[in-house]
Amino acid sequence: IDLMLANVCKQNVTRFPYEIARLAEDIAGGLMVTMPSEKDLRNPEIGPVVEKYFKGIDSVPTEFRMRILRLIENLTLGTAAVGYRTESMHGAGSPQAQRIMISRQGNLEQKKELAKAIAGIPPKTRK
């Protein structure tokens, strides 16, 4: 098992669900959290107003648009976010634990010396 690779991968993976959620929230906009309920959509009095103002393109029914927005809401803010986001962050240990192991196993001083050698810095002036 390559412990360094495992810790570096985990360090990167912990960021992706949060970035995906951020992008989804950005694309969805405020509509995701201000959208009326499905009950409002089906209400004989309010439904036509909801349909009118929440309609997107003609080929996608308003109900489908609302369902996708509810899914995004659930994955980023709702009950599914607990399992999706928090588990992604801490599922195999906290990110700080990965950073500690990376710093212990990374042999940073050797890498600094290699960089200096590649840059053509003579050995006697490196330290």
Image (cartoon, grey):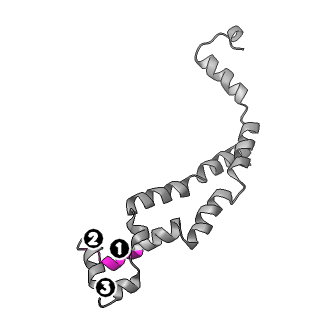
Residue 62 in magenta stretch = yes
Tell me which corner region of the image, top left, top right, bottom left or bottom right, holds residue 81: bottom right
Tell me residue 79's x, y (percent): 57, 73
Picture residue at 27% right of the left edge, 74% below the top: 53
Q: Alpha carbon of mark 1 to alpha carbon of mark 3: how far?
A: 17 Å
Q: Residues within 10 Å of mark 1 (few under 14, many from 20)?
A: some
Magenta: main secondary structure: helix
Tag 2's secondary structure? Answer: loop
Q: The residue tagged with tag 3: helix, strand or loop?
A: loop
| Count of number-bearing discs | 3
Which of 9/53 is in front? 53
Of pointers 2 and 1, the one earlier in the residue sequence:
2
Going by the numbered disc 2, the residue's amino acid type is: Gly
Q: Are marks 2 and 1 in contact (CB under 8 Å)?
A: yes
| In this view, 17 is above or below 3 | below
The residue tagged 1 is: 65
Residue sitting at x 61%, y 68%: 82
Amino acid under disc 3? Ile
Left or right of 117 on screen, residue 37: left
Residue pictured at 68% horizontal, 60% vertical: 91
Disc with the residue nearer the chain's start (3 vs 2): 3
Q: How would you rate the neighbour count of disc 2 (Cα within 10 Å): few for under 14, some for 14-19, many for 20 or more?
A: some
Q: Position of residue 93 (x, y in %)?
A: 72, 55
Q: Give, as a single range, the part of the protein colored magenta.
A: 59-67
Q: Which residue is mark 3?
A: 46
Query: Does the magenta portion include 61?
Result: yes
Mark whose residue sits in front, 1 or 3 = 3
Query: Residue 14 at what x, y percent from top left?
Result: 61, 53
Q: From the viewer's side, name the closer residue of 121 and 31.
A: 31
Mark 1 belongs to which amino acid? Answer: Arg
Q: Which residue is mark 2?
A: 56
Res 42 seen here: yes
